[in-house]
Every structure is written in structure tokens, then in C-alpha cells.
């Protein structure tokens, strides 16, 4: 078994076992001994008249500010008509070469210098499922350490596996059945930074359609896209509740129906979850560091808000709101 075979095994193992938010870092660390690099990026790009537009991704040993800086210089970044080349496309650049010293490239050159990108290997492949372009770029600080032809050939062989392994990890992550803190079934999706849907778990589309009946499924509704700039944000609609979270370049969107539990205070929700777990008052008090009488008072308040009179009614109410969402 050679180094490439071992690399593939390590990448596919990570796709099965690692959280989606960690997968790209793990995969890049596995690549590093085979194709050495200092920094890297892995994400989704578009090729537009105004330049290469980054729609989402993960930065390896690079500052988050680099994305905004790139947007300022994308208009003068040299581009290649990749549609005329074989897919995947792998290109190497040594930015200190004379052909890149033209005056119109000065802002882009300054950007490269700030981030020590003297040499670059850019691997790009169109994803059949989404129509977007996956891009993995490796960078070296030392201009003398050019990427070799055999390294470019290896990345050309490897990129389809990286894309497939990421999709597999994504599907595994989104397929996990989860209950929210409100004991409500929650479905998940991943999107790019502009709200274009990348993958979605079971029930996600049905939940979105309950709030927006004419939703097309290609991108998040405008009310949600407006919230994508924040590290985390919530949207509460008439029927559903959604949350957007970012983790290592992955944008997760979780969706669930609004639940009677939403009207409870944070302390009441904590008590309610322990009641649902079957704990008696004394154990609830011990778990939360409160007096047993306080636990009883919270329970009375919970029952009053939810319109139930007993633990049995309370459990049945939770069960009605925790079933997976299915297509009609």
C-alpha cells in the first residue's frame, strides 16, 4: 500500500467518523505529508465577470479577514477559462514570476504578500449535485518551493475523492435524528454564505414549506438569507423556528416546528426536560441546585402554561411534538 492509498483510507475514515465541522481540517492535515503546504483554503467558488467569488469555505491557518480582503481585489485576480479544461482543473502559480508583475495586478499582489501566498496550487471541480465549483487551494510561503508536476497530478486524482468524502460526511451529519431543547424534532441543512442550499436532511424541506408554501428549494427564503452574516441567529415564524450557526466554515441551518415548550422560561425548560426524563422532584432539585418546593412550583407553572394537569398529559403533549417530519 503506497502513500496515496493510505491517504484515501484516512480521508474516507474521517468522512464516516468525524463531525462535518472538523472534516476539512482533518483531511488537509492528512494531505500535508504527501503534498506539503503552509496554509490552505477549501470552499465553494463562482467564476463571474467580476472575478472569482468565494461563496463559502474553510480557511486552514489563515485569518477570517482574508475573505473580505479577497472580495476587494477579486476584480484584478488572474482567471483561467476552466470550462475549456479537463475537470477537475489543477493549476499552479508562482506569483513572483514576471508575468504576474503587471501594474493592474498590484492590489492582488499586495493581498498575496500579506498572506504569504508566494506559491499556489488551485484544484477546482464542478459538483454534479449542486452545479457549484468545489475549490481546494494549497499555499507555500517560500517562493523557491514551487509545486511540482507530480504534486499537481496527485491533487488532480485526489480532488474527486475529497469532494465525494465531504458530501458523504455531510449526508451522515444531516441524517442524524436529533431533538431540540424543546423536545421537538429538528431537521438540518447546510448552505453557502449566500444561502444557496448545499445539502439537506430528512424533513428540512417539508418544514420550510410549512412557513413558505411556495419555496422552490434552491436557496433559503429571503428572511433567512438576511441573517447569514451573523455567527449565529434565530428566526421565529408563524409555524417554525430556525437557527443558523457557523462552525469552521460550515453554515448549518436547523429547523423545527414551534413548540408549546417555547413559551417556557429557560429555568422552566430545564425542569421540564428532567420531568420528561422521569426524575422525581427531589432528584430535579438536586440536578438543578434548587429546593424541592421550588421544583414543585416550577412544575405547577409549566403545567399551567402548557394547559395540562398531570405528568401523563405533559408527556403525551411532548410526544405529539417530537415525531419526525414526513412528506404528505
Image (cartoon, grey):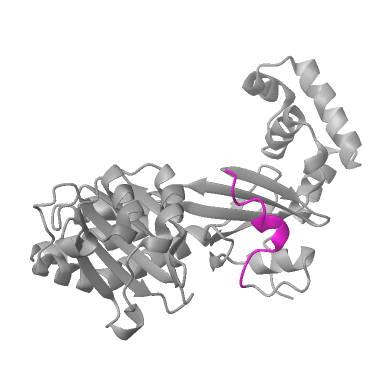
Q: Specify the quadrant of the image occupied by residue 294.
A: top right
> Percent position (x, y) of residue 218?
61, 72
- Say whether residue 229 is magenta: yes
Dominant SS in magenta:
loop
- Say whether residue 136 is magenta: no
> Percent position (x, y) of residue 322?
71, 54
- Residue 52's place in the image compared with 328, above or below, is above
- Residue 255's place in the image compared with 181, above or below, is below
**Front-lying residue, 213 or 68:** 68
**Front-lying residue, 58 or 266:** 58
Where does the magenta region start and end?
A: 218-230
The residue positioned 10% from the left and 64% from the top of the image is: 148
Residue 251 in sight from this viewpoint: yes
**Lateral position of residue 193 relative to residue 106, left or right:** right
Look at the image and tell me in which quarter the C terminus lies: bottom right
Residue 18 in sight from this viewpoint: no
> Percent position (x, y) of residue 120?
22, 58
Amino acid at each position: 500500500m503506497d502513500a496515496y492509498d493510505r491517504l484515501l483510507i484516512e480521508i474516507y475514515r474521517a468522512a464516516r467518523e468525524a463531525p462535518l465541522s472538523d472534516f476539512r481540517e482533518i483531511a488537509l492535515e492528512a494531505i500535508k505529508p504527501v503534498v506539503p503546504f503552509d496554509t490552505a483554503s477549501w470552499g465553494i467558488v463562482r467564476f463571474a465577470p467580476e472575478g472569482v467569488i468565494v461563496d463559502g469555505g474553510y480557511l486552514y491557518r489563515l485569518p477570517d479577514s482574508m475573505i473580505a480582503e479577497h472580495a476587494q481585489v477579486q476584480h484584478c485576480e488572474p482567471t483561467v477559462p476552466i470550462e475549456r479544461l479537463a475537470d477537475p482543473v489543477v493549476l499552479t502559480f508562482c506569483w513572483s514570476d514576471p508575468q504576474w508583475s503587471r501594474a493592474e495586478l498590484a492590489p492582488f499582489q499586495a493581498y498575496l504578500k500579506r498572506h504569504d501566498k508566494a506559491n499556489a496550487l488551485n484544484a477546482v471541480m464542478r459538483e454534479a449535485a449542486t452545479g457549484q465549483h468545489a475549490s481546494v487551494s494549497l499555499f507555500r510561503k517560500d517562493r523557491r518551493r514551487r509545486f511540482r508536476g507530480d504534486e499537481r497530478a496527485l491533487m488532480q486524482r485526489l480532488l474527486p475523492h475529497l469532494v465525494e468524502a465531504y458530501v458523504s460526511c455531510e449526508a451522515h451529519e444531516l441524517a442524524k435524528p436529533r431533538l431540540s431543547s424543546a423536545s421537538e424534532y429538528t431537521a438540518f441543512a447546510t448552505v453557502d454564505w449566500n444561502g444557496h442550499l448545499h445539502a439537506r436532511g430528512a424533513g428540512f424541506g417539508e418544514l420550510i414549506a410549512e412557513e413558505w408554501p411556495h419555496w422552490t428549494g434552491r436557496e433559503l427564503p429571503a428572511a433567512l438569507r438576511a441573517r447569514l452574516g451573523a455567527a449565529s441567529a434565530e428566526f421565529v415564524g408563524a409555524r417554525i423556528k430556525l437557527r443558523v450557526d457557523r462552525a469552521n466554515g460550515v453554515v448549518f441551518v436547523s429547523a423545527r416546528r414551534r413548540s408549546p415548550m417555547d413559551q417556557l422560561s429557560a429555568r422552566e425548560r430545564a425542569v421540564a426536560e428532567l420531568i420528561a426524563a422521569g426524575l422525581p422532584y427531589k432528584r430535579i432539585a438536586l440536578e438543578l441546585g434548587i429546593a424541592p418546593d421550588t421544583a414543585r412550583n416550577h412544575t405547577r407553572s409549566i403545567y399551567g402554561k402548557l394547559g395540562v394537569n398531570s405528568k401523563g398529559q405533559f408527556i403525551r403533549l411532548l410526544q405529539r411534538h417530537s415525531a419526525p417530519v414526513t412528506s404528505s
